[in-house]
Image (cartoon, rainbow, N blue to C red):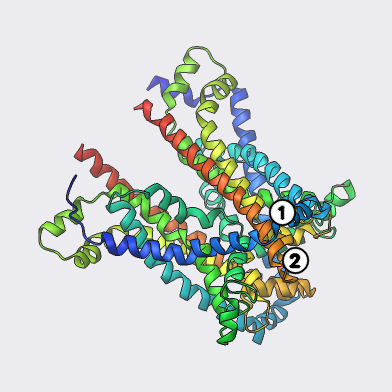
Amino acid sequence: MTMVHRRRRASTPRRLGRLALIVATCAFLCLFLLVPLASVFVEAWRQGAHAFLESIDDPDALAAIRLTLFVALVSVPLNVVFGVAAAWAMTRFTFRGKALLGALIDLPLSVSPVVSGLLFVLMFGAQGWFGPWLAAHGINIIFAVPGLVLATIFITLPFVARELIPLMQAQGTEEEEAARVLGASGWQTFFRVTLPNIRWALLYGVLLSNARAMGEFGAVSVVSGHIRGLTTTMPLEVEMRYNEYNYVGAFAIASLLALLALVTLAVKAALEWRFHADTDVVAAARRRGT
Amino acid sequence: MRRRVLPGFGLSLGYTLTWLCLVVLLPLAALAWKASGIGFEGVARLFTSPRTLSALKLSFGGALLAAMANVVIGLVVTWALVRYRFPGRRLLDALIDLPFALPTAVAGIALTAIYAPNGWLGQWLVPLGIKVAYTPLGVLLAMVFVGFPFVVRTLQPVLQSLERDVEEAAESLGATGAQTFLRVILPTLVPTLLTGFALSLARGVGEYGSVIFIAGNIPNRSEIAPLLIVQRLEEFDYATASALGIVMLAFSLLLLVLVATLQRWTRRWAEPAT
């Protein structure tokens, strides 16, 4: 007790150092994070509510919002299926080349968004691998919606798998094995035992991949061709309006995206709280077991 | 060898591999195939062009400087968030992820608006001779913005689990605060800081959305390498675009290997303690 007590009453220079670090941290984070965030909303409302609403209630803006939602709605569920399958294979079995597979799953995270978009142009673009064949059959992938979806799937591929793999590794296989021994089928085991155990981590992965899918810019910009009303997602509409010096219009859509980011952060904080409860339970079970 | 009790090995692994081949490996093969079309002469022409060199220098050099700045900033911010209790700490902690959550295009135009000569901060900085918007300094700033959460988020769990008794031992043996930090705490954080550094570097080198608005994209001065790829693609010069793409991809792969090695090192470092 006396140890702790003495540590609490730190010397004056140390208290000053602590105060300086706290002030520096707060100042940096406010200047660096809060000021840019605030500026998005201020710029969007610069000419009042009427101008703001007018820039959003506009056919191009509405088309961009619809397209963004569509792209996320297609790519996120595909990532969920991939993430669950990959996590099941990676954590429930041992096989050769597992480390390599893990690295491949993480690969899209470290590739430049522009290079990610480039990959799909080289596959499906006019001079790409499948370009001539696609052109002969009248199928458009690049400068069309399928290209946007493909690039988004590539970019967001690791998000669900990365959340599930460490958790499923930590949870182990005892509960699932017990279910099997008691006569549950493979799918019953998955839906009644595995899924409830991983639900918060899964939701967390969905949240992150959705935020990225809706906000992706670089990869989508390369494959989009910027056709207004047809292939511009919200971030691309922001860019086009900004380059046309329509600042209020650009920031109006940007403020919607910033709102999405704030909601994502809030839900993330709430989930982390749940998530920690889950991992604490696992950790406690481990300690009891050993 | 234990018999497999759980089913679904063939299905889950088969699906994972098929999907990875279609979405990741096949496109990568297309990149390698297109880039090989440029030939040695093309590569030589590309990498002696002053404009390409200046863009590569800005992307790699800028990201390197930004990653170094992020290590220092990240260490200070994480230290304050983990070791001290102060009002607003949890809110700031949640806000750290803002650069991850905020779409890059939004971050780009917001930073530009703030640091433009008539912006909130620009109007004070420009008279002092500090021009941020439309200069390489702006590129650096955007790279710091997108990269610093990587350092904080890799460092945070390590700093939280650091045993206090070693520090207390150092102090009871008469070490000053600075000595304890430099000789006891910092050495154990080095692998983690390097991981954060590499992650921030990888992000900075490839960053596009948040950089292009504030950079102003002046040839030979504030153009970044990803922008050159976009420009070549707009001219339908696929071969040059893929050659540049291969260079950037090779660098990302190198960093990926580095991070994996560092993480193995960190684990080994942490284990003998128990």
Query: Residue B14 sits in which quadrant?
Result: bottom left
Residue B251 appears anywhere in the view: yes
Question: Secondary structure beneath disc 1?
Answer: helix
Q: Residue at x 83, y 49 (%)?
A: B125
> Are labels 1 and 2 assigned to the same chain?
yes
Query: Residue B34 sits in which quadrant?
Result: bottom right
Q: As drawn, is A280 to the left or to the right of B164?
A: left
Instruction: Give the x, y percent position of residue A35.
Output: 69, 56
Q: Residue at x 66, y 51 (%)?
A: B205
Q: Which mark is residue B40?
A: 1
Image quarter where the C terminus of chain B lies is: top left
Reading the chain from its start, which is encountered first: label 1 or label 2? 1
Instruction: Give the x, y percent position of residue B146.
Output: 63, 53
Q: Which residue is mark 2?
A: B231
Q: Which mark is residue A178?
A: none
Q: Residue at x 19, y 67 (%)?
A: A188
Residue in front for this viewpoint, A24 or A6 = A24
Mark nearest the camera among 1 and 2 is 1
Residue in front for this viewpoint, B91 or B162 = B162
Q: Residue furthest top?
A: B173
Which chain hosts label 2? B
Q: As drawn, is A281 to the left or to the right of A74?
A: left
Residue in front for this viewpoint, B20 or B143 = B20
Mark 2 is on which residue type? Gln
Question: Secondary structure beneath disc 2?
Answer: helix
Q: As drawn, is A104 to the left or to the right of B212?
A: left
Q: Residue at x 64, y 64 (%)?
A: A218
Mark 1 is on which residue type? Phe
| Position of A163 relative to B255 (above/below) | below
